[in-house]
Image (cartoon, rainbow, N blue to C red):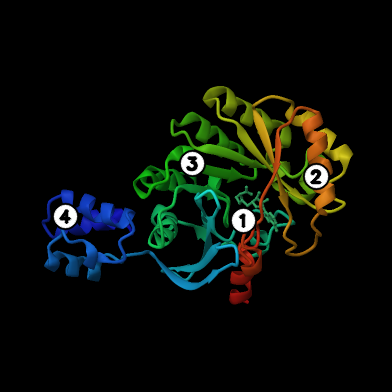
Amino acid sequence: MDVALLERTLDELGEPRFRAGQVWSWAARGAQSYEEMTNVPAALRATLAERVPFSSLTVEREATASDGTVKALFRTEDGRPLEAVLMRYRDGRRSICVSSQSGCPLTCTFCATGRMKFGRNLTSSEILDQVLHFRRIEPVDHLVFMGMGEPMMNLDAVLEACDRLPDVGITNRRTTVSTVGWLPGIEALTAQSRPIRLALSLHAADPELRSRIMPVNDRYPIEAVLGACRAHFAATNRTVFIEYVMLAGVNDSPAQARELAEALGPGRTFKVNLIPYNPTGMYDGSPREVIAAFKAVLEEHGVHATIRLTRGRDIDAACGQLAVSSARDAA
Ligand code: SAH
């Protein structure tokens, strides 16, 4: 829901300002339509239904995986595709993975979104409407900006959405922004005061290898990016999550694990999340034993590491797969 449009429309109708708050609070609690908003006069509900679209997105397709993961493919009003995922965990946690852009201008070689045409930044309403879509299914409590796009290139809209997420049940502490290492964005996130979690997609500690698989490393080199992450930890005392996608024979050797451990150092500044790769093109994923061995080397060096649980593989909803089906649609 475009809250700015809602407020403008209510002003034009001569309605009191508190109406916007009423409408938003219904939407944030998962209302299915204006109809449900029983403390808003029926005539006004009908007018709003005509003038303020209940969602800025239309659902084009939705699929549920055997593990309960739900993936939705949306379109913006101007026809741009984007996807979001609801992940359900046994402990009751409900986490949403949202897109910040339709497509992505960066060209990481292992990522399907990088091969899709870049569309545009999403608005804060389009980000929130992904969340509200799932909120209408059930209560949600965590969110990661790990869908399509680079959130740090659209940080204003991302932060604007973050300001409304607590109304939906997702506090800023349970919100994670993941970046390729877009330096000005990391610095801006550190400079503001919301307690949002920072995650860095690192994928290689060797600068040359990193530049090969993530060309953005030429623009914002790894040393500078890790420096900004250390400054983030120093300023916020919040551990920075390092994402490391395990590519067979590319970045998964014990020597590369040692190199990563040396780049990060022991302590609480960083925590590594090893991501089993979902083949979407030119690489194979590392076998399970190789990932376990890599993790063991990190831990020997005092670097805390976990292996990410893969969700929703059978519906192409796993990490990095989001663009696959929509790219197929666009083709
Ligand atoms: N642009 C941001 C946000 C996208 S997050 C970023 O790169 O951090 C998407 C995460 O999924 C990144 O860590 C990315 O490296 C990872 N990823 C991309 N393709 C993947 C794939 N096929 N399998 C597993 N992880 C993938």
Q: Residue at x 15, y 59 (%)?
A: 40
Labels 4 and 2 touching (C-beta < 8 A): no
Mark 2 or mark 3: which comes first in sequence?
3
- Helix, strand or loop at disc 4? helix
Type of amino acid under label 2? Ala
The residue that label 4 is drawn on is: 11
Q: Residue at x 12, y 55 (%)?
A: 15
Labels 1 and 2 touching (C-beta < 8 A): no
* Residue 262: image tag: none
The residue that label 2 is drawn on is: 292
In the foreground, 28 or 126: 28
Labels 3 and 1 touching (C-beta < 8 A): no
Mark 3 or mark 4: which comes first in sequence?
4
Label 2 packing within 10 angstroms: few (<14), some (14-19), many (20+): some
Beta carbon at label 2 within 8 Å of ligand 1: no
The residue that label 3 is drawn on is: 174
In the foreground, 101 or 49: 49
Where does residue 290 sit, x and y in percent of width and height? Answer: 84, 48
- Helix, strand or loop at disc 2? helix
Position of residue 16 relative to residue 263, above or below, is: below
Distance Cα–Cα, label 3 vs label 4: 34 Å
Distance Cα–Cα, label 1 vs label 2: 33 Å
Q: Which of the two marks, 4 or 2, is nearer to us in this view?
A: 2
Position of residue 244 relative to residue 7, above or below, is: above
Type of amino acid under label 3? Arg
Where does residue 252 sit, x and y in percent of width and height? Answer: 83, 46
Mark 1 or mark 4: which comes first in sequence?
4
Mark 3 or mark 1: which comes first in sequence?
1
Label 3 packing within 10 angstroms: few (<14), some (14-19), many (20+): some
Say which quarter of the image contains residue 330: bottom right
Labels 2 and 3 touching (C-beta < 8 A): no
